Image: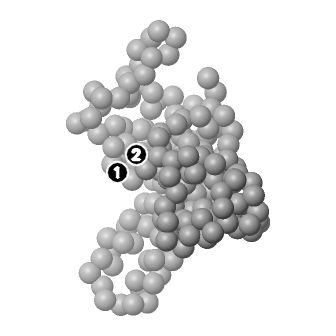
Amino acid sequence: MTIGEKIKYFRKRIGITQAKLAELSGIHPVSIRKYEINKMVPQVAQIDRLAEALGVSSFALAGFENNIRLETVGDFMGLMIMLIKTKIVSINGEREESGMTNADTVEFVINPFITNFFGAKVDKTDLSANTILYYLKNENILSDILKWERINHRYEKCAAEICDTSDKELINILEELKEQKEVVELELQHSSILLEQ
């Protein structure tokens, strides 16, 4: 989805008009319309104002086109989705009949080529990337990540199976599945709960 499509999605989700969004964000209504139909792309300052008015993170609207901030659960979910989609992080584990990865067997793995570039300091203690990912298993967000991963896995599997088809009906079904997956991704990024310090 484009930034404009995301703005429209979140605006409709909370049930406000373009005029109300303009009022809440302090951005001219004509600009809001142009953003939503992709005639104009908001700058970083406008993205921040729109995100605040919509009750979402800037990351939910712009992804990496804006600065990365990890302040909320929504920010973190957006980052995790991006890392998994780009194969920087993978989720390994036993897949159940439902297609969901069994939470008890989950292992988050960083691509070995870039593991050395990830790390953090917590209370003056250096933590490796793999140690950080281990802590994800103890967080409440694991179930949401696994639900998204199941949908993403199914989408990728379907896309691979019909990649060479010219059947318009199958292509339309795949496009609908992609849109549903994107809506789930947006919903996961909607949380404004602050991450624990």
Q: Please give the name of the residue rendered at 61% of the width and 40% of the height, measured from the top-left corner.
A: 73
Q: At which x and y percent is residue 14?
A: 75, 61
Q: Please give the name of the residue rendered at 33% of the width and 43% of the height, measured from the top-left corner.
A: 88
> Left or right: where does residue 65 sit relative to residue 117?
right
Image: 177 above or below 48: below
97 or 28: nearer the viewer: 28
Helix, strand or loop at disc 2? Answer: helix
Q: Which residue is situated farthest in the top direction here?
A: 124
Image: 6 above or below 172: above
125 or 102: nearer the viewer: 125
> Left or right: where does residue 169 sit relative to residue 193?
left
The amino acid on which the numbered mark 1 sits, given as a three-letter code, is Thr
Helix, strand or loop at disc 1? Answer: loop
Q: At which x and y percent is residue 138?
A: 57, 31
Query: Quadrant location of residue 132?
Result: top left
Image: 164 above or below 191: below
Q: At which x and y percent is residue 38?
A: 50, 70
Mark number, residue 83: 2
Crowd rating for badge 2 (residues with CA inside 10 Å; few <14, some 14–19, many 20+): some
Image: 193 above or below 167: above
Q: Please give the name of the residue rendered at 61% of the width and 23% of the height, measured from the top-left corner.
A: 197
Q: Please give the name of the residue rendered at 39% of the width and 53% of the height, measured from the top-left corner.
A: 85
179 or 9: nearer the viewer: 9
The residue to which callout 1 is attached is: 86
| Callouts 1 and 2 close, C-beta under 8 Å | yes
Query: Quadrant location of residue 195?
Result: top right
The amino acid on which the numbered mark 2 sits, given as a three-letter code, is Leu
> Left or right: where does residue 65 sit relative to residue 180?
left
